[in-house]
Amino acid sequence: MYQAFISIMIIINFVVLALDHHPSNPMTENRKELMNIVFYFVFLFEMIVKMIGYGFTLYFQNSFNQFDFVVIVISTIEIIINFINLGNVSLSAIRALRVFRLLRMFKLAKTWKSFNDLLNLLFLTMKKVLYLTCILLLVWLLFAILGKLLFQYRMAFDERNKPVLNAFDFTKGKYRQGAAPDFNFDSILQSIMSVFVFFTSDGWCRILQDALRMPGINKLLAIVFFFALFVVGNLIIFNLFRAILMREFDQQSLLDKVELELKESTEETESYWKVLRDKLSTFVCFKRGTQV
């Protein structure tokens, strides 16, 4: 009952935090602040009770308790700063600390077996794809640098979305006319974002279209670059990620199925032995009775 109450409080706290929006009603904000303080004291009381019951040594030996302690400390800092409203501290920065309370959802894994199995499977899978992740980051950075070398300051369009040649003024460091599209290769950060769009297959055709529309860009070179980026990044590496994840999930499902079958067979064997012991006991008692 106690653990169920804590789980319900975690879920309600998550829902209350999800209700944050802009612009907000001051009365609604005050109510949410009050509810957040109530949640804070509930979880603080839980932590104190566990510390008294287990003792500090046993309490901090549990990873879930360590995690909960960190979240409580961060929540305490956020409430104190919000209460005294220190100087020029931004309220948005203070409220950003509240995001750490969302991490408390992971405590449900302690009582929710399927959620716990899923988290363990994800952590195990991430360990196995560590080297593949390093390769992905290297390929990502490689294409970002290459795209910056090929298309930097060479993609610009005016207000009518018409291409503009030689629009960038290198002496002033800005465009003479027009502007670069939303996803471009003018800086390393913009280049990384554009490559990420290709990796996710979301809006990549717009970047390709902008590059092919520019008269100053070699069309064949652009097609080769974006084709290689799409094939290597999306079709090969991302599909390897998906294949590894699916394999791990299939293996876990198979292990769960085997474990369930073993458990059922064990219970069936125990029931057979119980029936056999009962029959043997009855037979022995019957024999002793006839001998007497």
Image (cartoon, grey):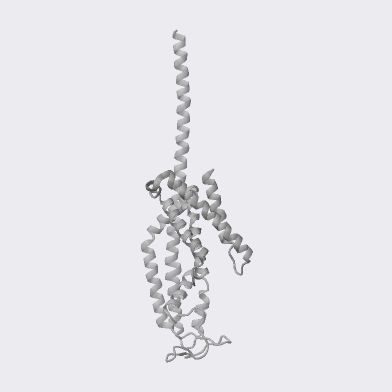
> x, y percentage for residue 147?
42, 79
Q: Quadrant of the C terminus?
A: top left
Residue 11 visible in the picture = yes
Q: Residue at x 53, y 77 (%)?
A: 206
The residue lying toward the viewer, choosing from 201 and 68, is: 68
Callout count: 0
Q: Is residue 234 above or below residue 67?
A: below
Q: Is residue 14 above or below residue 57?
A: below
Q: Quadrant of the N terminus?
A: top right
Position in image of residue 268 (x %, y %)? 48, 33
Q: Is residue 253 visible?
A: no
* Residue name at image x 45 percent, y 19 percent: 281
State the image coordinates of residue 264 (x, y, percent, origin top left): 48, 37
Query: Outermost residue, top direction?
Result: 292
Residue for point 41% across, 78% down: 188
Q: Nearer the viewer, residue 246 or 113?
A: 113
Residue 282, compared with residue 268, is above or below; it is above
Q: Residue at x 45, y 13 (%)?
A: 287
> Viewer-proximal residue, 50 or 162?
50
